[in-house]
Image (cartoon, rainbow, N blue to C red):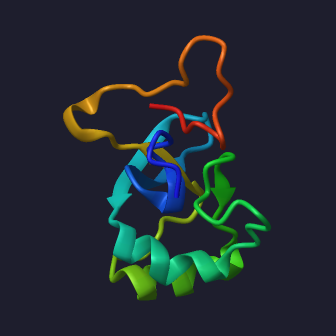
């Protein structure tokens, strides 16, 4: 594991389940712990993006029941589009980026 890259192995990440209404307004947001994420990630087709660092993944209608059951959360609202994605969660809230001229060894999630 590359210690210079803080997100290797899913370190320093948090996952958010977000919901957007018909007008694209954020209507729901819940943070997932690493343990919760590890329990639900098998439901999504992640390919090589095993930590969901490449973007938001839709929680399709066929996944909603399984996601709520696994996470132990209430029913997801009809008419709301839900997505799951990673965010950086570095100690102290600082934002990490590679040194000038260096390329990150992997994707850098949005702060």
When asked about the image quadrant of residue 33, the answer is bottom left
User: Does 57 sit left or right of 83 as displayed?
Assistant: right
Q: Quadrant of the C terminus?
A: top left
Q: Where residue 24 sits: x, y (%)? A: 60, 35
Camera-side residue of 84 and 110: 110
Residue 30 sits above or below residue 39 on the image: above
- What residue appears at the point 44 percent right and 28 percent down from the top-left corner? 96
Residue that protrudes farthest toward the top in the picture: 100
When asked about the image quadrant of residue 20, the answer is top right
**How many badges with numbers are in the image?**
0
Q: Where residue 29 sits: x, y (%)? A: 39, 50
Residue 1 sits above or below residue 44 on the image: above
Q: Where residue 71 sits: x, y (%)? A: 38, 79
Residue 46 sits above or below residue 6 on the image: below
- What residue appears at the point 54 percent right and 85 percent down from the top-left corner? 65
Residue that protrudes farthest toward the left in the picture: 92
Camera-side residue of 40 and 26: 40
User: Does 41 sit left or right of 71 as displayed?
Assistant: right
- What residue appears at the point 55 percent right and 24 percent down from the top-left corner? 98
- What residue appears at the point 51 percent right and 34 percent down from the top-left corner? 25
User: Does 7 sit left or right of 45 as displayed?
Assistant: left
Q: Where residue 35 sits: x, y (%)? A: 36, 76
Camera-side residue of 13 and 104: 104
């Amino acid at each position: 594991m590359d210690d210079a890259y803080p997100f290797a192995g899913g370190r320093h990440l948090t996952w958010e389940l977000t919901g957007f209404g018909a007008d694209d307004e954020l209507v729901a947001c819940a943070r997932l712990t690493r343990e919760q994420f590890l329990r639900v990630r098998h439901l999504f087709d992640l390919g090589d993006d095993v930590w969901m660092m490449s973007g938001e993944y839709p929680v399709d209608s066929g996944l909603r029941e399984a996601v709520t059951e696994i996470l132990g959360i209430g029913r997801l609202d009809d008419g709301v589009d839900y997505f799951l994605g990673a965010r950086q969660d570095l100690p102290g809230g600082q934002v990490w980026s590679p040194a000038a001229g260096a390329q990150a060894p992997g994707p850098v999630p949005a702060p």
